[in-house]
Every structure is written in C-alpha cells, then in structure tokens.
Amino acid sequence: MDLGIEYTDDNESSFCSLWSRIHKKIDCVELFSNPKLGDDYFFNRLNIKNWCNNFDDILNYIKTNYNYNLNSYHIHMICNNENSARLNRPKFGTMKILSLDVNKYVMHSNKYIEIDIIDKNSLNLWIDVFCRSFDSLNIKDEVRTIISKQFKKLRLFVAHYYLNQVKYPAGCCLLFEKNESIGLYCLGTAHDFRRKGVARELISNAVKMAKINDYNSMIVQTLTKERYEEFYKRLGFRTIYKKMLYTFYLN
C-alpha cells in the first residue's frame, strides 16, 4: 500500500477507534463496535486491508461473539478488484477519500457566519449541533460521553449564522491528527441552515488550523450516494483512493 494512503487510512481508523467500545484485531479484520451508536456505517465497521483465507470463519466468529444486538456491521475494503470479487456480500456503497492541498485553497468568508473554536466549557453546544445536523438526537448521551472523554485529541468547531441580528448555531466539524495527517470529520449543517455557505465556512477555518499546524493537506471522506463529492471537488479536494462498503448482517 502507498505510504501516504496508509497514513491517511490509519488516521481514519484511529478516529473511529475513539468512538468504539470494542476495538479488536481478528487476523485480517479490524473490528470497531459501539452498540450505543446503532447501525452506523462509519463507526460500526470491519476494516479489511489484506485478504485472509479464513475470512468467512472470522465473520462467523464475529457474528457469534460480537453481535451486541446490532443488525449489521459494514465491511470497509480499499478498492481491489481481486478482493472485491471474493467478497460475496451485499454492497452498501462506495466511500471516496479526498485530499485538499491547503496551500492552494482559496479562502472564503461570509459576513453572516461566525466560526468558534470550542473549549471544554462549550462541549454541550458542539454535541447538540452535531446531533441535530446528523438527525442523531437518540445517541446524544453516547456522543457526550465520547466527546468529553476524547476532547484533548480533537479540535472542535461550531458555526453560527446571523439572521435578523440573532445568532443561531448552524453547523459543526472537527479535526483529528494522527500519523502526519489531519482529517476533517463530523462536518454537518443543521437543516434550517443548509445551502447558506455554512459547510464552506467551516472548511475554510479548518484549513486555517491545518496550515497553522504545518500540514500541507487535509483529508475528508464522503459516501458517493450522499452526493457531496462535487461540492468538495469545487473547493479543490481530489480523490486519492476509494473504499467499497458491504453490509454484513448479523441476524
């Protein structure tokens, strides 16, 4: 595997591990599990980097021992035609991993949007905006537990939108650093403030932070069926590799 891709993929895996209650390597499969996050395709996952001959046995072992009343895990596999052909499971989708050259990024500003860097005293604000942006109010307590515990490893941002001189929490994101790479995660906008430039303003501030910390690039993931890829490409992101995602049903 290309070293840059390996570092990028490790950034993603390390970030996912922060959200896991169970994180375990079983031969060629890396398991991330947190039943309190439901059947989330990003966090309840099985990573496969290299194929192993006893793969089906490993899946059966996981089904028996790591079910936790989940309906499914999602298998994440870096695109490889040979391995994909071997994996006879329902395809969930394609996830693209994109990179942005932060030194070439053209900054944007919007007079109606203000971005705040969140300190520990403002964690509840970030958590509330995150859960509203991702329709995840049902997991709010677990998100609070995770973010409170991992706060020192993350850089959290909240966007506020000014409307009729009133300031409204409108969006959020965070940055995570690992292995010489920095990733942009949890980029979301509250329903009432979509298509108003909130996500772009959050990205601009994330770019500033990446540059301050001497990074030349910043990574982001997007599921193709969510149709955000063109938005990222207009801002200068480019695809560096793809993952195939498959559904592994547990029941």
Image (cartoon, helix red, strand yellow):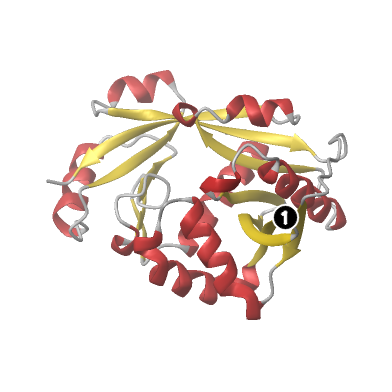
Say which of 14 and 251 sits in front: 251
Say which of 204 and 82 sits in front: 204
Q: Position of residue 73 (x, y in %)?
A: 29, 46
13 sits to left or right of 36: right
Label 1: state its secondary structure.
loop
168 sits to left or right of 104: left
201 lies above or below 32: above
Say which of 240 and 26 sits in front: 240
Q: How many marks?
A: 1
Residue at point 59% right, 73% down?
Answer: 123
Q: The N terminus appears in which quarter of the rendering?
A: top right
Residue at point 41% right, 18% down?
Answer: 81
Q: Position of residue 233 (x, y in %)?
A: 69, 26
The residue singled out by tag 1 in the image is 164
Residue at point 72% right, 41% down?
Answer: 200
22 lies above or below 93: below
177 sits to left or right of 29: right
Q: Quadrant of residue 37?
A: bottom left
Q: Residues within 10 Å of mark 1 (few under 14, many from 20)?
A: few
The answer to whether residue 96 of the structure is visible from this angle is: yes
110 lies above or below 213: above
Outermost residue to the front:
164
